[in-house]
Image (cartoon, rainbow, N blue to C red):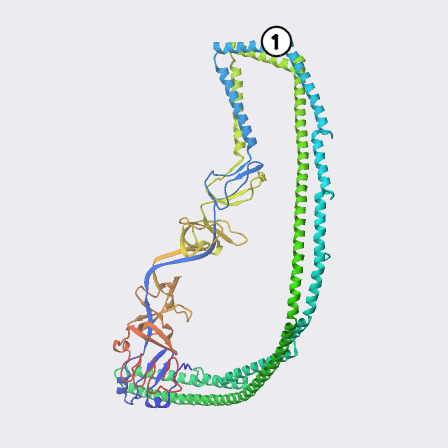
Amino acid sequence: MKLPIAVLSPKWIKTGALLGVSGAIVTVYAAGGFPKSSKVMAQQVATPKSIYVQTATAKLGTIAQTLALTGSVVSPQSISLSPRGAGNVQSISVHVGQTVRANQVLAQLANGTAQAQLLVAQGGLASALGKMAQARQSINPYTLALASANVQVAGDKLQTLMAGAAPAKITQARAAVSANAQSVTQLNQQYAWMKSSKGSQALALADAEHALSALKSGQSPLALAVTNAEQALQGLTNGSAPQNVAVTVQQANATASTAALQTAEGNLQRTQSNTSPQGVAVASDQTTLQTDQQNLVNLQGQLQQAEAGNGLSATVQQSVVSAQNTLDAIKSASSPDGIKVTQDQQALAASEATLTSLQAQTPVTTTLQTQIASAETAVTNAQDALSSDQAAWNAAIAAAQNQLNQASAAAQTANQNAVTALQNQISAAQEAVVSAQGKLAADQANWTNAISVAADQVNAASAAISQQNLANQGKLSILQADQSQAMQIAARALATAKAQYAQALRTDEQAVQMASANEQTALQRMQATLQKAQATLLSSRDNLAALQAPPQPSVLAAAKTAIAAAKLKVEELLHPKNQGTLQALQGAVTAAQGRLQIAQQALSNTVIAAPFPGVITAITAQPGNAVTAAKPIIAMIGTTLELQAQLSQQDINQVHPGERVLFTLPFAPSQNEQGVVASISPVVNPQTLSLTVTIAPARPIVGMASGETASIQVVTKSDPHAVLVPTAAINSQTGAPQVYLVKNGRALLRPVTLGATQGAWTEVLAGVTAGDQVVTLGQTFLAPGDHVTVSNVIARASGAVTAKPSTSTSANPSHAAAPHKGKHHKGKHHKGKHHKGKHHKGKHHKGKHHKGKHHKG
């Protein structure tokens, strides 16, 4: 059991060697007590107590005061693109997440009409430019001769139209009409004959259909052969054939001869069945045996539990647990006796400290000697009180241990009684198992004998009919062979007849299909020939009518217009256009250029392009969809990203544009990225009472995506020459921050003014200078002015603080750094004749009450 405070035996107290535990300080007193002489006392108690602590050096460093914000990644460029006109989507050349260039084509609308309009506009402009060029050209003989020739050609064409067609052409056209009409008449007659029932194709189809109908009627030789074969096979199958009758009679004889054997076999099966009287008895015996065996196993398990001490009743177990808890409570340092001992130890330590302080004073005066004598008396009284209270505590522990021993003895007696009772029950259970095994063996023997008798009856019946079965089987085999052969022959005949009938049926059906197809093909060919002849006849008639008809007024008008245009061209060449005509032509060119620009813009409106470099974030249309100018179909953001966070209006004076920013992103939470405050919105959000802060990252970050969150630290203040101390050194128990400094081996308490805290370091604005040694561990056990020993390791044990010294800052180095080795102080820290142990092992600390994690004996 772990004892938080060492329990001291009266013998140890009597010798004068005393271990005092005060707070977290281990103080060891030499054996032999204190002499009455103050001079000897001063010699023995010359070293004040020293407390082990850990320290760190205050240093100059950079401290940054930050303001924490939570923001999100946004893009300053975001746009939804819609067509500049209605139409159908022809293609979309990007996908969501794709990075695009500025002016890259993202989608294309159907542009057939726009392209046609562009071609028309280009042609109009070319025509206007051509006319303008012609108007500016000077006359030349070649152009004038060509224009004059065009006038002659137009006149000749008009004269030809007025004169009409030649008689020879009209006669030739009439002959063609007559020949074509005669050909159409002959083809109509041939087509009508082919469609009638007397046509060669119709007669061939009728013959094929008649042959197929005769085959399907069932009266053809092939159909009759199939019917006869089916009847013969059916007679053999249903038993009406002579072969079947003979086989049936022989099978009945064989069945009758084996009836006795079947009866004997049935009796044997019933006897072997688990439902027979013998089987039921054996099953019951097995169930009884299993029950008895399981009962024995259960009792043996209970016996094992009882022998292991786990079979006690709850009341008995509770009495033992209660006694143990009582003993633990009395041994605890928080028990009334433990508290008294602790208080006595503290009082003794205080008296000793007073005595030590007085003995250290010089010169020695009468008053000082009186004070020392009083202090010695106080120490003696404190020792007596500690001895008395320690003895009372030991007595209480012994009484509680006695109660625990009595409860354990009672539990052991109850457990032994339970073991004896279970052993008696096990003996009875073992006898029941042996009895059940004997009954099972007897019933199994009876069942085996009954099965043997039934088997003998089966063997006898089988031997009695073996000869008769052999004779019957030989005759039956011959009859069955004849019957099987007849059925095979009938089946083969039926299969052959069916195959021949099926082949003939397929042949006739194919003949009907072929005759029908030939008839349709011939009719289609004749109809096509007739339609071609009729078209030729109409064409020849139209040609004849055109030759005989007078010229159309529109044709004559067009010819006359051509003559006038040709003459006008000659006139224009002879007399060039004036300046007014050139201006009109220039206006036509300008108008054509405007129409071309409109057509080019219309074609450009069918293209959706990226206005800036960025990333596609959404596509809401597919090729073939109808879209309008007011509905966006593609959304994108720019490639440049920034952070936005909401700043409380109370913190507005702490953040300014240009200040440095540290931030982390979810995909790399341990990596600090750099940035700068780019701008602060001048308008407060009326709902959140905050302002929007925009932060520009110092570099492009791979993986950074719009919409993700960011943890932001705005550096509002930075001091590269701040005095820094570990945050663990700051003590604020009194309300105001303080630190312990170590100077000349003593602890000095200093009030401090704190600045910013960053990680494990805190800025000290006043009270500490760089280079000061501040206590980081052990300050809770210090008081101002205490002697201290700086150690690298501080260990807590049983309310005491021990350490392995590394550097001594005590006023007396010979006592501060030494581990106290000697006759009475040998050990890890206090080894000796009376202090052996992990911390306090020795001759007088072994026994029942001195075992524990830190007090082994």
The x, y position of residue 533, in whole percent, is 66, 22
Q: Which residue is mark 1?
A: 159
Q: Against 821, is 416 above or below? A: below
The image quarter containing residue 196 is top right
Secondary structure at numbered mark 1: helix
Depth check: give the residue in front, 385 or 10.
10
Identify which amino acid the numbered label 1 is placed on.
Gln
Visible residue check, residue 552? no
Depth check: give the residue in front, 767 or 234.
234
Visible residue check, residue 496? yes
Quarter holding the N terminus? bottom left
Depth check: give the residue in front, 842 or 528.
528
Q: Against 228, is 753 above or below? A: below
Quarter holding the C terminus? bottom left
The x, y position of residue 110, in whole percent, is 56, 35
The x, y position of residue 169, in whole percent, is 63, 12
Q: Against 777, is 61 above or below? A: above
Task: Assess disc 1: are there few (<14), some (14-19) or many (≥20) residues with their C-alpha within 10 Å of its C-alpha.
Answer: few
Taking the spot 38% from the left edge, 67% from the top edge, the residue there is 728
What is the total number of numbered labels drawn onto the structure image? 1
The x, y position of residue 291, in whole percent, is 59, 81
Depth check: give the residue in front, 68 or 521.
521
Taking the spot 61% from the left edge, 9% from the top edge, the residue there is 159
**Direction from residue 798 to residue 499 in the image, left or right:** right
**Direction from residue 765 to residue 240 in the image, left or right:** right
